[in-house]
Image (cartoon, rainbow, N blue to C red):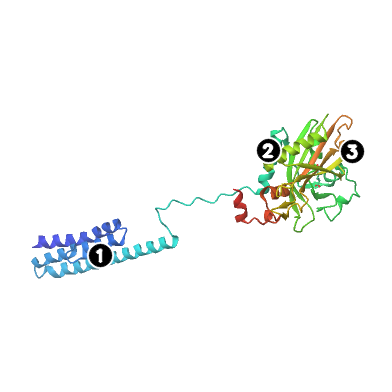
Amino acid sequence: MAGEKHAILAELESLVSECRHSLDQASSLEGLEEARIAFLGRKGRLAAAMAEMVGLSKEDRPEVGRKANDVKAALTELLESHQSLLNRNKADAKVRGFDPSVPPRSPWGGSMHPVSLVSQEICDVFKKLGFDIVSGPEVENDWHNFEALNIPPDHPARDMQDTLYVTDNILLRTHTSPLQVRTMLEQQPPVAVIAPGKVYRRDSDLTHTPMFDQIEGLLVDTKTTMSDLRGILRHMCREVFNTDIKLRFRPSFFPFTEPSAEVDISCVMCGGKGTVGGKPCRVCKQTGWIEILGCGMVDPNVYGYVGYDPDKYVGWAFGLGVERVAMLKYGIGDLRMFFENDVRFLRQFS
Ligand code: DAH
């Protein structure tokens, strides 16, 4: 009899750890229910162990009975706590919308800004022609930004209206043209450089922002003409706009070039016709032309500032507004979109 008592106690003892083991494998409510039936059910392990008690002596029964009650309580608690664990996991998964069978969402990548894209594209055209890319400081001094470019102290371009001064002599460069000066001071001809960069002006309205992007081009050699410049600019426009763009040179004035010109391209919106679908073209205001850059033959006075022999060398230069080209290339009607950094806008260029 004593042997039977110990056997029943040992069986009861093992039920708790066996149940815990079964629950470790039960990851669903169905698995939990199976374990409950196996251990606490009418024909379960606990019921079977208690049925053995009928053969026990009167003295042994209370002890085994107490043990059976303790085991029942322990099993009940185990099953309940596993149930609440499963419920919590299910709720969490719902909140996270987690479904392990769905492939992961690919992370959002950044994309190049359209102004950077166009700037890079233009520079690439010139790189293939053998031009070097150069850069320089955005905080410039008066001499590089104005004086050496043949812009005398009383010239209207120096007006406080346009220039953002840091001190009397230090300013935020108003154009990329000081890079012509810096390049010529550093290199001897033949020189062929392209210089992209940010420029700053005290100007802010619908079509002007205090910061914008320019690309400067400079070529100096013993022999070159304005028609070389024209051919290269035409090539660049055709590469960037992927269509047969026409160029128009209009006489203009810049202190650092002589002669000077402003260059218009045939309107990319209306193809130069001035109308789109019978309606006046908004972009070129019906003229069929859009201005994109200023250029000219380097003024011999500038050679004097950088120590080049004006009798030996000739050259040409141009300065182009990158935002303007990007607006035309991508059909963007509002300059402000470039600066608002709305991801819905930017993501279209990835
Ligand atoms: N720097 C001029 C501007 O910002 C543009 C320009 C005109 C650049 C003629 C040039 C040039 O290199 O030759 O308005």
**Which residue bears the numbered disc 3?**
301
The image quadrant that residue 227 belongs to is: top right
Q: Give the residue drawn at x 20%, y 69%.
A: 69
- Is 121 placed above or below 340 here? above
The amino acid beneath tag 1 is: Leu
> Nearer the observer, disc 3 or disc 2?
2
78 lies left or right of 323: left
Mark drawn on residue 75: 1
The image quadrant that residue 35 belongs to is: bottom left
Mark drawn on residue 124: 2
Q: Nearer the viewer, residue 285 or 5?
A: 285
**Comes first in the chain, label 3 or label 2:** 2
Q: Give the residue drawn at x 88%, y 42%.
A: 150
Q: Give the residue drawn at x 68%, y 38%.
A: 124
Measured Cα–Cα span from mark 3 to mark 2: 31 Å
21 lies left or right of 226: left
**Comes first in the chain, label 1 or label 3:** 1
> Nearer the observer, disc 1 or disc 3?
3
Q: Nearer the viewer, residue 213 or 145?
A: 213
Do tag 1 and tag 2 residues touch (Cβ < 8 Å)? no
- Is 334 placed above or below 62 here? above
158 lies left or right of 35: right
Measured Cα–Cα span from mark 1 to mark 3: 99 Å
Q: Give the residue drawn at x 79%, y 36%.
A: 229
Residue positioned most to the front: 278
> Nearer the observer, disc 1 or disc 2?
2
The amino acid beneath tag 3 is: Asn
List x then y, in percent, for residue 303: 87, 36
